Image (tube, grey):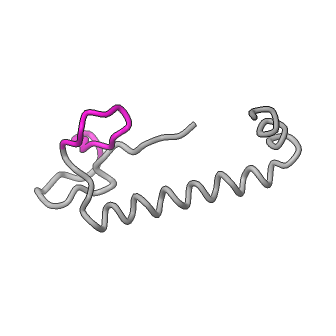
Amino acid sequence: MWRPLLIDLVERPEHTHRIVSKMAEYYESLNEQLEQLGLFEMDPLQIHCTSALNSTLPGEYDGGPVKRSQIWGRGMA
């Protein structure tokens, strides 16, 4: 399974770039919607990949909905 993916990186880089760009657009849109719906939490469940409020990021928490700029996001390799 991995071999075709790695070959695509070399032989079809534009194809791989389109896939990764589409994934990035999806996650950006998802997080924007979560923020608009007020679904980010100050104290989420203690799961290693859950976004959480972080006081060292820009923007003071004012008691309102938690914003994307105030949380650690999830990352992908």
What x and y, as percent, mark residue 28? 47, 59
Q: Quadrant of residue 73?
A: top left
Q: Specify the segment rendered in magenta.
A: 43-57
Instruction: Determine the residue positioned at 27% across, 42% down.
Output: 52
- Outermost residue, right direction? 11
What x and y, as percent, mark residue 35? 31, 62
Instruction: Determine the residue positioned at 82% across, 43% down.
Output: 8
Instruction: Determine the residue positioned at 38% across, 37% down.
Output: 49
In depth, the one of 58 and 18 nearer the eye is: 18
In depth, the one of 43 and 62 nearer the eye is: 43
Counting every numbered tag in the picture gives 0
Q: Is residue 44 magenta?
A: yes
Instruction: Answer above or below: position of 17 versus 45.
Output: below
What x and y, as percent, mark residue 77? 58, 36
The prevailing secondary structure element of the residues shown in magenta is: loop
Instruction: Report the side of 4 relative to 30 (left or right).
Output: right
Instruction: Report the side of 10 relative to 68 (left or right).
Output: right
Instruction: Answer above or below: position of 68 versus 76.
Output: below
Instruction: Report the side of 51 relative to 66 (left or right).
Output: right
What x and y, as percent, mark residue 53? 24, 44
Q: Quadrant of residue 48?
A: top left
Q: Is residue 11 magenta?
A: no
- Outermost residue, left direction? 63
